[in-house]
Amino acid sequence: MSEKLLPYSRVGIVGAGQLGLMLCDAARRLGIATCVLDADSGSPAFVRADEAIVGDRFDPQALRALAAASDVITFEIEHADTATLAELEASGTAVRPSATVLDTVRDKWRQRAALERAGVPGPRTVLWSEEGGNGRLSSGVPLDPPFVQKVRFGGYDGRGVKIIRSEDDEPLPGASLAEELVDIRCEVAVLVARSPSGRELAYPPVRMEFDPEANICTRCLLPAGLESDVAERCRTVAIEAVRALGAVGICAVELFMTGDGRVLVNELAPRPHNSGHLTIEASATGQFEQHLRAILDLPLGSVETVRPAVMVNVLGGDTAGSPAVSGYEELLALPEAHLHLYDKSPSKPGRKMGHLTVCAGRLEEAVEIADRAEELFRLNGHNADRPEHATR
């Protein structure tokens, strides 16, 4: 048994939002040092990281500085200069997941094509014209409305997705793909942890609930309420999808459960994910610690569910401004209610400002407490002058 000085390793994180913040918290508990890279010095993870670099994710010089400060580079957002990352990999820097994986995943068409080549089930999809917005298809068999339009690059949290119900609907601008509008029974996510040496574990499926207008995830429930054989099929399909891309670390696989019993891959995120936040309290190993274990090729932690749980996204209310909360003390008085605020400012309508996880002995009980929490707690923008420490 060899002795190793702490920190055990230095992890560079591209991006410094709330996912980076929670990665830094998990790293500190494990004796791992972190360095974050982001253009905004006010990003949440800047106050939690051991070191921070102010720089653009597409700036080669900034990425090289991150590599110099790190043993392994990883991501809380997949949009970065992959050409420079590939150069760093070629020169010996560990980049996990790889630049190739990022290139594939951030282009929804390339992602879908890679999954189809591997035989991973998904909705029927064809390529929209490169120009987008003119209703032409440049390859594949055309889809008649209704279908789902997805922009190829940059879409997230409901942005870049639109249901085209008739030929009169105005499409979103930009290069896109057109996807079969499937009969969705429910949407679930499976987190898959995969290490460079090939170790892999899949968490139990989490059921996701969405705001029908904004198409943004509002709640996640664990367990997902699926039959045991269906839940196992979800885990199997998710592992196949991650293997097809060769991703390392935590990878979130979003799945459609259809009315006719199919399990279809919607899309992947090769990083910690909103659907996995409840694992911090509800699982033996939270997703952020698991991601660090995986990218450093350490033993993977147990994915066992310790307690049923509900995660509720705390979204900015109707007004923009400095974050202001109401019902704070009443929320904290609820049993097994765990509040995570992301230190973001300003608050904007629909912006993810935090999350709340409620654990209980039964899922039904957790849902009841979460319902009560949503009634009590509000986060809105406040325009009055506030002390600096209250507006960070």
Image (tube, helix red, strand yellow):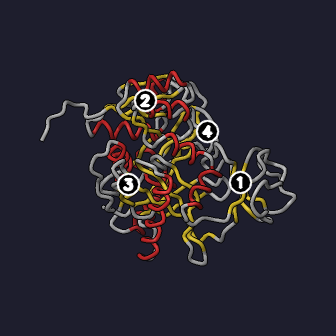
**Is 93 drawn above or below residue 284 in the view shown?**
above
Residue type highlighted by circle 4: Lys
Cα distance in 3D space between marks 2 and 1: 35 Å
One can see residue 333 in this view:
no
Query: Residue at left 30%, top 61%?
Result: 306
Asked where in the image residue 199 lies, by quadrant, the reply is bottom left
Q: Earlier in the sequence, mark 2 or mark 4?
A: 2
Cα distance in 3D space between marks 3 and 2: 35 Å
Residue type highlighted by circle 2: Ser
**Front label number (2 vs 1):** 2
| Tag 2 secondary structure | loop
Cα distance in 3D space between marks 4 and 1: 30 Å
**Front label number (4 vs 1):** 1
Cα distance in 3D space between marks 4 and 3: 27 Å
**Is 295 drawn above or below residue 117 in the view shown?**
above
Estimate the x, y position of residue 285 in percent, counting from the top left: 31, 53
Q: Which residue is mark 1?
A: 177
**Is 321 drawn above or below residue 61 in the view shown?**
below
Residue type highlighted by circle 1: Leu
| Tag 4 secondary structure | loop
Q: Which residue is mark 3?
A: 279
Cα distance in 3D space between marks 2 and 4: 42 Å
Q: Earlier in the sequence, mark 3 or mark 1?
A: 1
